[in-house]
Image (cartoon, rainbow, N blue to C red):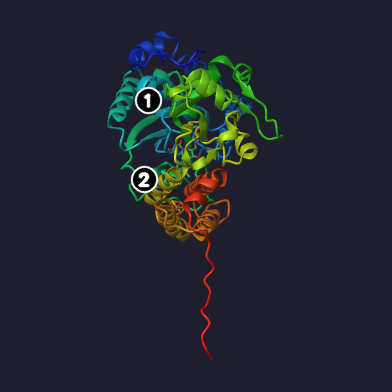
Amino acid sequence: MPERFLTRNIPAKREDRQTVSYETYVERGGYAALKKALMMPPEEVVTIVKDAELRGRGGAGFPCGVKWTFLPEPDGKTRYLCVNCDEAEPGTFKDRLLVDFDPHSVIEGMAIASYACRLDSVYFFIRGEWSEQAVIMQNAIDEAYANGIFGSQGLMGGASDFAVECTLHRSAGAYICGEETALLEAVEGKRGWPRIKPPFPAVKGLFGRPTIINNVETLAAIPLIIEHGVEWWKSFGCTSSIGGPASFGLKLMGVSGHVNNPDVFEIELGTTLRTLVEQYAGGMKDGRRFKGAIAGGVSMGILGPDQFDAEMDFDIGKKYDVMGLGTACPTIFDEGTDMVAVARNVARFFKNESCGQCTPCREGADWIYKLLCRIESGDGSMKDLDQVLEVAGSMGIIPGTTICGLADGNNWAVRTIINKYRSEFEERCKPYIVPVTPLTAS
Ligand SMILES: Cc1cc2nc3c(=O)[nH]c(=O)nc-3n(C[C@H](O)[C@H](O)[C@H](O)COP(=O)(O)O)c2cc1C
Ligand code: SF4
């Protein structure tokens, strides 16, 4: 069994895991990267993160250092960092591992990002259902304050005169609040409705001020890059095989579903799904055959039975007909899985979670769900199946009909399941009967 966590302070055995306190984190070399960063000009830290080509770990894979350069020059007024710890994407549980067991690695990343981008106010936005994790994170933030990381004296007990304050904000609990602009609305105390972009948050974000939104895992990678350097980071992962941007570094990948050992593993981008399942997650449960996998969070769509050797990197979307790598947390299905039931269940999720602002998403999600229920029950027709594909294919930012990507997630999940397992759907459908107008005697 390969090393499960190459760089994290997390034991391989689940029963040995416990939250790493501030003292233990420091004993193990923690906060050395922050100290190192504070000795550089802020722009140099931004350049390092840019050179490392760190891509966002929240789902979209946008280059982190490039996003940071979109900020305007500081004007002396408050600027924000929002940490996205909503993690409500079905099958995704990698950020929770960091919060549960290594919260100071995230806090160190937050402090470095704040210093580099001149962001003096941090909101840690945490998923509403995570009561236990909210307590763990608040304790870690309190420890960081008690040890001078945050607070009015300046970062790291005054090692820098740049002072950062940090607030934990618990979500009221809705999947859409993980979308970055819905998150901003939620922190402002409003209903979590995504905003139309532009303006982008870097220019006009929280309370109308410049704001960077980063995922928990993205921020936790930053101390590693500062401590070990750009070349070290780029020694992991891979360049693109299709001429696109590279997929450098290590990534937390959570595997769930029909495997013997569902868990989170820290591995190189570009590792195949087969390796992830067979060498890390203990293989397929009961030796059954692989049938497919939700690529990386349900929104990304499905990898089919012949795509077990797909490389888990940012090329995956273009190469294997899924939307993208997403959160890199696959859910594995074995040969006994009913894919019609999977599609119906996925559609139910999106129908329930649509915020309702855009008609194609609000109405389309409901139609898709109802049609799939009909097909699953054996009352559906081939016409219903075609209609699901037509409705799904017309909703989302990519077709240009909605404000946010939740609808694209519904589109890709449903369409790829139907396209890759079409015969299962057709077997459940009644034939496409063209209505014939009865002849009448004239
Ligand atoms: C419906 C929806 C839900 C999302 N949920 C999350 C989430 O739970 N956590 C997250 O980090 N990003 C989520 N995102 C992506 C964010 O909008 C954003 O891209 C991300 O937080 C940026 O951080 P990164 O660049 O560090 O990845 C979601 C996007 C959409 C469209
Ligand atoms: S796409 Fe759906 S979830 Fe996103 S803003 Fe529109 S209605 Fe809301």
Say which element carries label 1. helix
Q: Earlier in the sequence, mark 1 or mark 2?
A: 1
Q: Nearer the viewer, residue 164 or 236?
A: 236
Asked whether residue 131 is in view, the answer is: yes
With 362 as the anchor, is 74 left or right in this view?
Answer: right
Q: Which residue is mark 2?
A: 186
Mark identifier at residue 99? 1
Say which element carries label 2. helix
The image shows residue 381, relative to residue 248, as above or below, that is below
Q: Nearer the viewer, residue 429 or 358?
A: 429
Q: Is mark 1 within 8 Å of ligand 1?
A: no
Q: How many marks?
A: 2
Mark identifier at residue 77? none
Q: Residue farthest to the bottom?
A: 442
Q: Are marks 1 and 2 in contact (CB under 8 Å)?
A: no
- Quadrant in the picture for the C terminus: bottom right
The amino acid marked with disc number 1 is Val
Asked whether residue 37 is in view, the answer is: no
- Which of label 1 and label 2 is nearer to you? 1
The image shows residue 383, relative to residue 264, as above or below, that is below
Within 10 Å of disc 1 (Cα), the crowding (few <14, some 14-19, many 20+) is: many
Within 10 Å of disc 2 (Cα), the crowding (few <14, some 14-19, many 20+) is: many
x, y percent for residue 178? 42, 41
The image shows residue 59, relative to residue 275, as above or below, that is below
The residue depicted at 30 percent of the width and 30 percent of the height is 134
The amino acid marked with disc number 2 is Ala
The image shows residue 14, relative to residue 181, as above or below, that is above
The image quarter in which residue 156 lies: top left
